[in-house]
Image (spheres, rainbow, N blue to C red):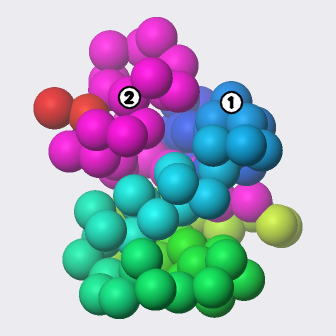
Amino acid sequence: MPESALSWRALETRVGLDALPDFHRAFLHWRGVEGVDAMPLRRVQQRVEAELNRMVQGDLAAREGDDWRLIPGALEGFEAAAPYLPEAPDSLPL
């Protein structure tokens, strides 16, 4: 995994606890998961982890303990993440 890999847990920390449920729902919408708005919060959290694991299978991330390290560009197109991403140009969604 490249040094510039983005920690999912660090990203969640930047988002903040109050905004995290909406961020997770936006992530699931971006990933194409249906019925997100009707899901209970716990189910949303489970689906986020499932999608992150799918990203691992697609070589967009690597699992490290209870974290996922996302390769640069893995969140391309996920506009809701843009305000929380590091300033490095290769981590910004296009």
Res. 90 in view: yes
Q: Is 69 displayed left or right of 80 in the figure?
A: right
Q: Is 8 displayed left or right of 72 in the figure?
A: right
Q: Report the residue marked by disc 2.
A: 82
**Res 47 quadrant in image:** bottom right
Q: Report the residue marked by disc 1.
A: 14
Total labels drawn: 2
What x and y, as percent, mark residue 12?
68, 45
Query: Nearer the N terminus, badge 2 or badge 1?
Result: 1
Single out the residue that lies furthest toward the left. 94
Quadrant for the C terminus in the image: top left
Q: Who is closer to the viewer here, 78 or 90?
A: 78
Secondary structure under tag 1 reads: helix
| Identity, as a three-letter code, of the amino acid under mark 2 | Ala
Secondary structure under tag 2 reads: helix
Residue under the point 73% across and 43% down: 18
| Identity, as a three-letter code, of the amino acid under mark 1 | Arg
| Magenta region, residue range | 67-92
What x and y, as percent, mark residue 16?
73, 36
User: Does 76 lie within the magenta span?
Assistant: yes
Is there a contact, CB below 8 Å, between mark 2 and mark 1?
no
User: Does 52 lie within the magenta span?
Assistant: no
What x and y, as percent, mark residue 78?
29, 46
Res. 7 in view: no
Residue under the point 66% across and 68% down: 63
Single out the residue that lies furthest toward the right. 65
